[in-house]
Amino acid sequence: FGDGTAWYISTRLDVDALAPVLRAVYRDAAVQPPDLPDGVEAVVRRGREADYLVAVNHSDVDTKLQVADGVELLRAEPVTERLDLPAGGVAVVRIAAPRPSGGDGHV
């Protein structure tokens, strides 16, 4: 509706075939950062002053996520380009909101 985007798939896909399609849909909708490792869930909440990335690692493998610079709020530590997310870990990263006239809006 309006400036929105709709996706339509005219076939039944198995899990392996659907995964890359859904990654593209999530990326297009800014629901999740692109290219998340298996077992990692992430969502971005946008605010006036800042954006917040909430990441959960459901896997048993430590991982790193590429993120915009910010502050990981649960550990009160700065994050520069990469977020270390341990197996079973949770992180909340506060990222300065992009300015309307600039910034690329990526997280």
Image (cartoon, rainbow, N blue to C red):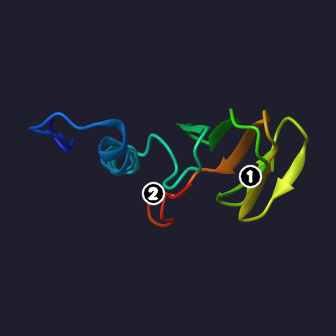
Q: Which residue lies at the image location 45% right of the left edge and 57% below the top edge?
A: 100
Residue 68 percent coordinates (x, y): 65, 60
Q: Secondary structure at mark 1?
A: strand
- Tell me if 28 is positioned left or right of 104 in this view: left
Could you say which disc has been placed on residue 84 in the image?
Answer: none
Q: What residue is shown with label 1?
A: 63
Identify residue type, mark 2: Pro
Q: Are marks 1 and 2 in contact (CB under 8 Å)?
A: no
Which amino acid is tagged 1? Thr
Where does residue 40 sit, x and y in percent of width and height? 62, 40
Residue at 44% in and 64% down: 101
Identify the residue at horizontal 57%, vertical 54% (top origin). Answer: 107
Tell me the quarter of the picture where residue 89 sits. Answer: top right
> For the residues marked 1 and 2, what is the alpha-carbon distance in whole angstroms?
32 Å
Callout 1 crowding tier (Cα within 10 Å): few <14, some 14–19, many ≥20: some
What residue is rendered at 30% in x and 48% in y? Answer: 21
Image location of residue 31, percent across then percent down = 45, 40
Quadrant for the N terminus, please. Answer: top left
Residue 56 vertical position relative to residue 23 in the rendered view, above or below: above
Q: Which mark is residue 100?
A: 2
Which SS class for mark 2? loop
First of labels 1, 2 by sequence position: 1
Rendering quarter of residue 26: top left
Q: Residue 83 appears at what percent x and percent y? A: 75, 54
The quadrant holding residue 75 is top right
- Relative to residue 41, is residue 104 depicted above or below? below
Left or right relative to 92: residue 38: left
